[in-house]
Image (cartoon, rainbow, N blue to C red):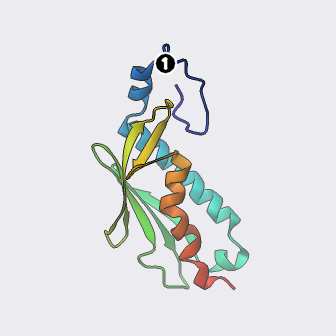
Amino acid sequence: MSMTTETRTTIEPNNFDWVSAHAACSVSKVFHQLQLEIRTDIETRNRLSTENEKSKYFYTCASNGNSLSVFIESQSVEVEGIGVRFTRTPKGIDAYSLAERLLFSGTVTLSNDGQCRIKVGEIEYNFWQFRKLTLEDVFFTNVARWRP
């Protein structure tokens, strides 16, 4: 079973191999997949930046095994503290501000429709939705003040 949450599989109620699906939905595998997808998001956001934005700042990331930090680098504007740090936990993935404030605590789960998801509170998110939830302010809101 693929971990890509964008793909839908028809589940036969009596034939679904939930054990294999659950094993494929481990925290380690989800964190690795999330890291790859976040790096792609960063590349896409940098590519979509206007020339004005590119002259002021760019998005980057750094990892150290159990965490991945996404942040802005700049030579011309003050960007300190704008970013998100994703940390792998025994049950899931937590997202912190760079000031170490917990933003979201996600639990990796196999949903009732057989998809690997990240649950925050009572809501189950596809991977892209979790990335949007955690990175939208970094990519769009916090930098709006530098746009013309």
Nearer to me, 137 or 67: 137
Q: Residue furthest right?
A: 51
Mark 1 burial class by Cα count in 10 Å: few <14, some 14-19, many 20+? few
Residue sitting at x 51%, y 46%: 127
What percent of the width, then of the height, locates residue 61? 47, 61
What percent of the width, then of the height, locates residue 27? 36, 39
Q: Quadrant of residue 52?
A: bottom right
Residue 46 to residue 54: above or below? above
Q: Quadrant of residue 145?
A: bottom right
In this rendering, position of residue 115 left or right of residue 104: right
Query: In this figure, what is the number of numbered marks?
Result: 1
Q: Residue furthest left?
A: 90
What percent of the width, then of the height, locates residue 54? 65, 74
Residue 15 to residue 3: above or below? above
What percent of the width, then of the height, locates residue 3? 51, 34
Determine whether the residue tagged by mark 1 lies in a helix, strand or loop. loop
Q: Which residue is label 1 attached to?
A: 16
Residue sitting at x 47%, y 49%: 35
Nearer to me, 142 or 19: 19
In this rendering, position of residue 111 left or right of residue 46: left
In this rendering, position of residue 114 left or right of residue 145: left
Nearer to me, 110 or 82: 110
User: Mark 1 belongs to which amino acid?
Assistant: Phe
**Where's the C terminus, which quadrant?**
bottom right
Residue sitting at x 50%, y 13%: 15
